[in-house]
Image (spheres, grey):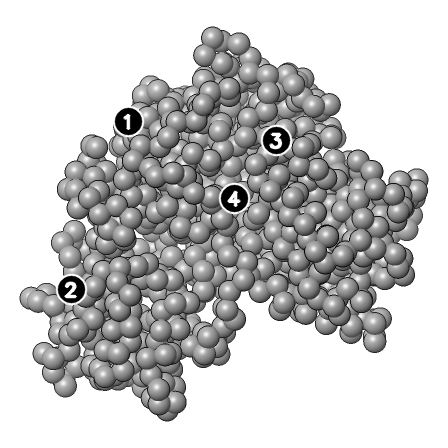
Amino acid sequence: MFSCTFSCLPPKFLLLLPHWKRSITNLLPSPSSCLPIQICHPQEHYTNKTTTKAKPSSQVSIDNLTSTMASSSSMPGGGLKRSDSIANMMPEALRQTRYQMKGCFQRYVSKGRRLMKNQQLMEELERSVDDNLEKTKLEEGFLGYIICSTQEAVVLPPFVSFAVRMNPGIWEYIKVHSADLSVEQVTPADYLKSKETLFDEKWACDDNSLEVDFGALDLSTPRLTLPSSIGNGMQFVSRFMCSKLSGKPEDMKPLLDYLLTLNYRGEKLMISDTLDTVNKLQTALLLAEVFVAGLQRNTPYQKFEQKFQEWGLEKGWGDTAETCRETLNCLSEVLQAPDPFNMEKFFNRVPSVFNIVIFSIHGYFGQEKVLGMPDTGGQVVYILDQVRALEEELLQRIKQQGLNVTPKILVLTRLIPEAKGTKCNVELEPVEHTKHSSIVRVPFKSDDGKDLRHWVSRFDIYPYLERYAQDSSVKILEILEGKPDLVIGNYTDGNLVASLMSSKLGVTQGTIAHALEKTKYEDSDVKWREMDQKYHFSCQFTADMITMNTSDFVVASTYQEIAGSKEKPGQYESHYAFTMPGLCRYATGINVFDPKFNIAAPGADQSVYFPFTQKQKRLTDLHPQIEELLYSKEDNDEHIGYLEDRNKPIIFSMARLDKVKNITGLVEWYGQNKKLRELVNLVIVGGLLEPSQSKDREEIEEINRMHSLMNKYLLKGQIRWIKAQTERVRNGELYRCIADTRGAFVQPALYEAFGLTVIEAMNCGLPTFATNQGGPAEIIVDEVSGFHINPLNGKEASDKIAGFFQKCKEDPTCWNKMSTAGLQRIYECYTWQIYATKVLNMGSMYGFWRTLNKEERQAKLCYLQMFYNLQFRQLVKTVPKLGEQPAQPVGSAMPGRIVPRPKERRTQTRIQRIASNLLGPVLPASNFSNDTA
């Protein structure tokens, strides 16, 4: 395999304040906080490529440590220097507890080579100390916290290598000798090599194994430094622009050049070519400001358009004298002495985005009768609502800019001739409740050039994407009569096609992951061979790395989606450094401190999802249908099971039937909890009812399990299982009818990137219980506006639901209070208008940002071009096209059955409880070579 290794190391992360417990607690992020953003030059994050040790000259052995070291490093009273790292502090902490820790490390290595997870590490630590006083001292000390912060450890006797995550996005890798307890700091690449040894030792030892380091190409790009700043990329970008555009005429040249490129179909906007120097522009701005100051505020632009043109100013400044004056003033302030506020305000007014292309390729994308189809869920609803909100915001901005321009938003998806009763075989379909937005469907092509007629699983889609990107580009250029201003990808396939198009046409690219499969399945990177024949993760993870690194900005719905929580890495963060033994080692994949990451939470369509208390808007004509859907006692193609006691409240869940959504997990919790079954009925909406009706592998398994659980726990009479419902308007009324029963919504997913159904349910006034793994943990304030449940502990979750309904039985006002609090939370934080404003601001800001980083971007695109052609294209050949026999992955054993993260784990260990108390809750080459931006 070819080698592409660059010299790049991870950050040397620091503890900043005197008391280690207090410093760590203070550094932990609060997604709702608005702490200032600190700009750090990228070189501060890197050290030399050679292994960094606690002492430069040799390994630090406990036997050689002197008593002059800061012995208090393992206790609250000690003083930590800014330059301290874990590797520097750990030797002294080990020295103080030498006897106990030797016993602990002997336990670690006693079972030979293995990969140990956090739970195992803490359990072994607890067992290694018998004396309760010593155990408490150890657990409350620095070492106890380090073990709590370790995500995993590689045991290669006599060494144990730890991957320590002290804060979101902040990792340090250390290696400890189990005999003499010497400590060595290692690079991510060296840690990954140790990990690879457990799975493919020959490949791990091969100096020519493929190692990719995308971070090496970002050395000149500044980074955020505070975990609490992650996801605030636009704020950072505006500050960086200010630091680069210092106010001197020569430094403002990039901004002037950018403004000179603004046009709509060849018609100049804002400034003409006569204003070709900064001084000329400033003079024109001064004259125009003085002029409009003497006009009535609401004077239409047309009244003074000719005067502006005499000064070299074109349309786009505003529709009235007042809006023109505000925009002129913003630019004048930026040219004089740029500050972040005026910089961001100005770019929010720049007329740079009119035509948007959104890619959502897999599944059945449509406006009706698609929800519940394979690979088709909340993402479709998200995009349709997104399009409506973006168009409304675009039209408002264009009017305020004083332009007579018709924007267009195109949603590019796949045309499926065998459409199963949907409109997925219609090439062009207007988006309902919009004026200028359409769904454009482009077919997949077979090798002989014919349209592929059948649905293709999202896991098998990769052989068709490159041709699809080419065909889509032709169609888009034809419809728009030019290039789009912004392309936005969704999920892995949509993001890859967006990357190919963005790089080819030189337009700004936004990325929305929705869900990254690597985080859904435990150890799916190191065990990729066992899963590749079924899921083709080799292609998917490679495509994800390409799209994340080509994108100009990334839109995430929550902080957790990017950087996780205090205890668990986020979806994107898990791609910082990882390995796929035998395939590729990512020494640096994606850095969540990159300013491309932004949080923009979506909302729900409030014309569909409104509170159950708004009686005048209720869709009473649908009630007979919903009555039959919920309560008829006949089993048919639409539903099975029945509800014997109609007076009970209903707990309700609606999702796709797959392992990660964990609907069968909820059914099992319900079946096992006698108290919960006494208090409420259970209604499930999801999937198909018989395995013979489905072609989706996971769905078939989950259908079989649903039937098995219903029989095992004798649930008929207490459960209603309804086939996936595609009528969105009726689904909204269904939520409200559940609320009429004084019920609740339950979202039990093992992981949920955002949780659109949570937003929908809360909009309708339903008290909501949602997974604490992912975005819902941010949407809901636990026990204030809803409840968090742990999907890995079914008994605890079901007891929590039962406890709420018991309280409501005793005090009915409890239900009303929670319903009202959930609605208040939605209105404050989760609306589509806020979302659309943020995304369009990103399109404008990052459009200029890419011009400021043109050279660095071009270098990275060349690297990605090579990676795409030499790696991804080869991997695509292992994915069988429709009708072909699957190819066996190179070097793989017989494929094993992939399983999601375990549903049941032990409850918190003693160390975890102590830590919680201390810290609080816890295309072809050419597609990458024509970028002119």
Q: Tell me where residue 57 appears, x and y as whole percent.
A: 6, 66
Q: Which mark is residue 515?
A: 4
Spatial CA span between label 4 and label 1: 26 Å
Image marks 3 and 4: residues in contact by CB distance under 8 Å? no
Quadrant for the C terminus, please: top left
- The residue that label 2 is drawn on is 53
Q: Earlier in the sequence, mark 3 or mark 4?
A: 4
Image marks 4 and 2: residues in contact by CB distance under 8 Å? no
Q: Earlier in the sequence, mark 2 or mark 1?
A: 2
Residue 646 as seen in the image, left or right of residue 448 = right
Q: Quadrant of residue 256?
A: top left
Report the front residue among 355 and 789: 789
Around disc 4, counting alpha carbons within 10 Å, would you say few (fewer than 14), some (14 to 19), or many (20 or more)? some
Quadrant for the N terminus, please: top left
Q: Earlier in the sequence, mark 3 or mark 1?
A: 3
Q: Tell me where residue 49 appears, x and y as whole percent.
A: 16, 51
Q: Tell me where residue 637 appears, x and y as whole percent.
A: 79, 35
- The residue that label 3 is drawn on is 695
Residue 46 visible in rendering: no
Q: Residue at x 61, y 40 (%)?
A: 699
Secondary structure under badge 3? loop
